[in-house]
Image (spheres, rainbow, N blue to C red):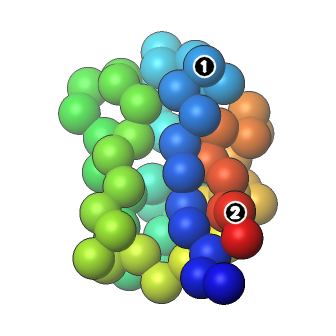
Amino acid sequence: MERKLILKKENCPQNHKCPAVRICPMGALSQQNFEAPAIDAEKCIRCGKCSAFCPKKALVLEG
């Protein structure tokens, strides 16, 4: 079963720069203003670094 990175927007405060965006080694996360980060599934290698770093557990690696 392939793992998938999902965003739980209800957990994301969306009032600051997302700290997980700069942790992604592939540049698969991006953020406009202070909105929830967007995930580029084509770039994401599902390593789990962003989900481990997300302080509110809004980024979750499932599977």
Residue 13 at x, y percent in the picture: 58, 18
| Residue assigned mark 2 | 62
Could you tell me how far apart the alpha carbons at marks 2 and 1 are, in whole angstroms?
17 Å
Residue 9 appearing in the image: yes
Q: Mark 1: few, some, or many residues within 10 Å (few <14, many ≥20)?
A: few
- Secondary element at image label 1: helix
Residue at coordinates 53% horizontally, 27% vertically from top-left? Answer: 9
**Which quadrant of the figure has residue 44?**
bottom left
Q: Nearer the viewer, mark 2 or mark 1?
A: 2
Q: Amino acid at mark 2?
A: Glu
Query: Badge 1 is on which residue?
Result: 10
Residue 10 in which image quadrant: top right
> Badge 2, how many Cα within 10 Å: few under 14, some, many 20+?
few
- Residue located at (74% from left, 33% from top): 56
Q: Residue at x 31, y 78 (%)?
A: 43
Residue 20 is tagged as: none
Residue shown at 64% from the left, 38% from the top: 58
Question: Which callout, 2 or 1, points at the residue further toward the start of the chain?
Answer: 1
Locate the C terminus by quadrant: bottom right
**Quadrant into which the N terminus falls:** bottom right
Picture coordinates of residue 62 (x, y %)?
A: 69, 63
